């Protein structure tokens, strides 16, 4: 479906062309989403930053997430787990993820806060949506900060995700929804884990681009 994340970002950007030159804010979810988000923000001539949202790993099965927490503490819990897991355990797991969130803010955003969100059109971008928890926690943060309009955007997800997200955001833009969706990676010819260093380089490249545009 996509050659790599850059290709996916370019295609996603064109699907969002109605927001070009409209002063939108693109917030990308690290780490893979930052590669996609950079291409979207560049095409749209939008502002660009990263929003940290972390999966809450299920006890004994860390690959599975029962929810997510955003950097402001906004929580999203998959419905059936709200009653299944004791609140104290959820709080403990969330606290553990807050430590990683703090690390990522320092490592990836150099400790800087998020740009102003209030009264803005915000486009939240990830490289794919599986369970959707990290994206939904990010949406909760943007609602808490009074975004005027929230768009959830991704190159690929399962078929049911668009309908689920449409209930909590103003617009959903997903390019591919394969009926036999198993993992985000299936949509990419070139798929690799994105290290912190690559994200940092993308942010540097963006800031250099902004300075060049100001000249």
Image (cartoon, helix red, strand yellow):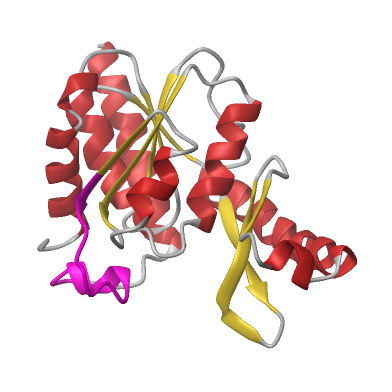
Question: How far across and how far down the image is residue 58, in percent?
Answer: 66, 77
Q: 36 and 160: which one is in front? A: 160
Q: Residue furthest bottom?
A: 60
In this rendering, position of residue 198 left or right of residue 16: right
Tell whether 133 sits left or right of 186.
right
Q: Nearer the viewer, residue 137 or 189?
A: 137
In-front residue for pair 35/118: 118
**Residue 61, x across and y down, in percent:** 62, 85
Query: Which residue occupies the foreground of this view, 199 or 45?
Result: 45
Vertical placement of residue 153 versus 179, above or below: above
Look at the image and tell me in which quarter the N terminus lies: bottom left
At a point 22% along the width and 14% down the height, the residue shown is 21
Instruction: Name the image quarter holding the C terminus.
Output: top left
Q: Is residue 112 visible to us here?
A: no
Taking the spot 12% from the left edge, 44% from the top edge, the residue there is 11
Whether residue 204 is situated above or below residue 107 in the rendered picture: above
Instruction: Give the magenta part as a residue range.
Output: 174-190
> Residue 150's quadrant in the figure?
top left
Say whether residue 7 is left or right of residue 138: left
Could you tell me which residue is drawn at 37 percent across and 47 percent down?
A: 163
- Residue 181 falls within the magenta-colored stretch: yes
What residue is shown at x 64% (from left), y 59% (from top)?
79
Residue 157 lies, in percent from the top left, at 30, 59
Magenta-drawn stretch contains 32: no
Q: In the rendering, at what x and y percent does residue 172 appear?
A: 32, 38
Determine the image quadrant of residue 213: top left
């Amino acid at each position: 479906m996509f050659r790599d994340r850059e290709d996916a970002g370019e295609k996603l950007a064109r699907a969002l062309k109605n927001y070009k030159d409209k002063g939108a804010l693109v917030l990308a979810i690290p780490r893979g989403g930052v590669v996609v988000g950079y291409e979207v923000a560049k095409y749209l001539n939008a502002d660009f930053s990263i929003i940290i949202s972390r999966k809450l790993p299920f006890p004994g099965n860390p690959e599975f997430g029962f929810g997510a927490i955003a950097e402001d503490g906004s929580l999203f819990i998959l419905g059936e787990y709200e009653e299944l897991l004791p609140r104290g355990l959820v709080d403990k797991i969330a606290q553990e993820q807050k430590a990683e969130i703090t690390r990522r803010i320092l490592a990836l955003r150099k400790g800087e806060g998020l740009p102003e969100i209030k009264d803005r059109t915000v486009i939240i971008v990830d490289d794919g949506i599986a369970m959707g928890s990290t994206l939904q926690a990010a949406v909760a943060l943007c609602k808490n900060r009074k975004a005027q309009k929230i768009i959830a955007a991704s190159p690929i997800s399962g078929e049911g995700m668009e309908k689920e997200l449409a209930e909590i955001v103003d617009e959903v833009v997903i390019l591919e929804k394969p009926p036999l969706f198993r993992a985000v990676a299936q949509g990419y010819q070139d798929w690799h884990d994105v290290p912190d260093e690559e994200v940092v380089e993308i942010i540097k490249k963006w800031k250099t681009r902004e300075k060049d545009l100001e000249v």
